[in-house]
Amino acid sequence: MYFSFYAPEGIHALEGISANGNPSPMITRLLFLVILAFLLSTTPTLAAPGIDAVTVTTTPQGVQSYSVTIQILALMTLLTLLPSLLLAMTSFTRIMIVLSLLRQALGTGQAPSNQILLGLSLFLTIFIMMPVFDKVNTDAVQPYLEEKIDPPTALKKASEPFRLFMLKQTREADLEMFIRISGKAELQSADDVPFSLLLPAFVTSELKTAFQIGFIIFLPFLIIDLVVSSVLMSMGMMMLSPMVVSLPFKIMLFVLADGWSLIMEMLAASFYVS
């Protein structure tokens, strides 16, 4: 009797609802206190005079320094653009396309899975781009953290290693095509090419190179498929799928040739990194 008399109200109080269906008085007072404490804690900060969250200070030498709020905003913006920068300015695109074409050539369906290919492409990209990252850290990040250079100078110094890397991988024909389309025929050298032209030219060159490598990878597996298909046709086994029969032979050939090591070495050697 004691449990049946007190349990419903106790359960409703724990849920924030009283027995009559209205909010519990204890929950209501607690919410009121939380809202009041929040307003009291934020009102002096908002009303405090002379405090600017966004400030840009210019020193007598003409160097501009930005407040922490602007720096955090710039950092968050860069983090949102990080996937696009990874695709457009590193070796990730070529590696991912080649590995995807390799999986199709093997005919293994979803093995390796997309997550494995993404992880392998990401860490191989870090390995290939490590000289570029080291130069950016030495020339831009560390001097900026030590307050030896201002943010615009740090950004300019950080872009130079990436620019040099992208120029080495970009085909001259692709670069000339985008220069011709943009109408900027007055550019005298590659150093004068802006990032707005270099980025699409670099991505186009990466796509061409990736599909060329994929074509070379496809050839031995295509030969195995043709041989197996011809044998099955000569034996009159037309109802049996050649893909089912050729798959073990392609896997065996790839393993015996140490295919993963050859693919990784070929991809790493296909980039020109100083």
Image: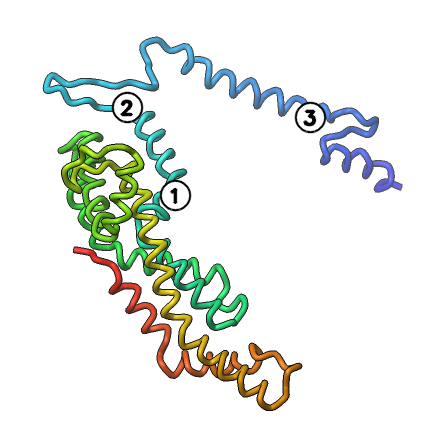
Q: Which amino acid does the dot numbered 1 rest on?
A: Ser
Please state, as top left, top right, bottom left or bottom right, where the N terminus lies in the image.
top right
Mark-to-mark CA distance, 2 and 1: 27 Å
Q: Which badge, 3 or 2, comes first in the chain's sequence? A: 3
Are there few (<14), some (14-19), or many (20+) residues within 10 Å of tag 3? some
The residue beneath circle 3 is: 26
**In the displayed structure image, the side of residue 142 where residue 42 appears, left or right:** right
The residue beneath circle 1 is: 84
Q: Position of residue 222 (x, y in %)?
A: 45, 75
The residue beneath circle 2 is: 67
Q: Which amino acid does the dot numbered 3 rest on?
A: Met
Q: Position of residue 164 (x, y in %)?
A: 19, 47
In this view, the residue in front, 154 or 8, is 154
| Residue depicted at x 26% and y 45% | 175
Residue 257 appears anywhere in the view: yes
Residue 133 appears anywhere in the view: no
Q: Position of residue 57 (x, y in %)?
A: 22, 18
| Above or below, 81 relative to 99 | above
Q: Secondary structure at mark 1?
A: helix
Q: Which badge, 2 or 1, comes first in the chain's sequence? A: 2
Q: Secondary structure at mark 2?
A: loop
In this view, the residue in front, 203 or 274, is 203
Q: Which amino acid does the dot numbered 2 rest on?
A: Ser
Q: Position of residue 117 (x, y in %)?
A: 44, 62
Choose mark 3 or mark 1, whichever is in front. 1
**In the displayed structure image, the side of residue 15 where residue 132 appears, left or right:** left
Q: Hey, which residue is sitting farthest left in the picture?
A: 61
Tell me which corner region of the image, top left, top right, bottom left or bottom right, holds residue 266: bottom left
Tell me which corner region of the image, top left, top right, bottom left or bottom right, holds residue 193: top left
**In the displayed structure image, the side of residue 133 where residue 46 appears, left or right:** right
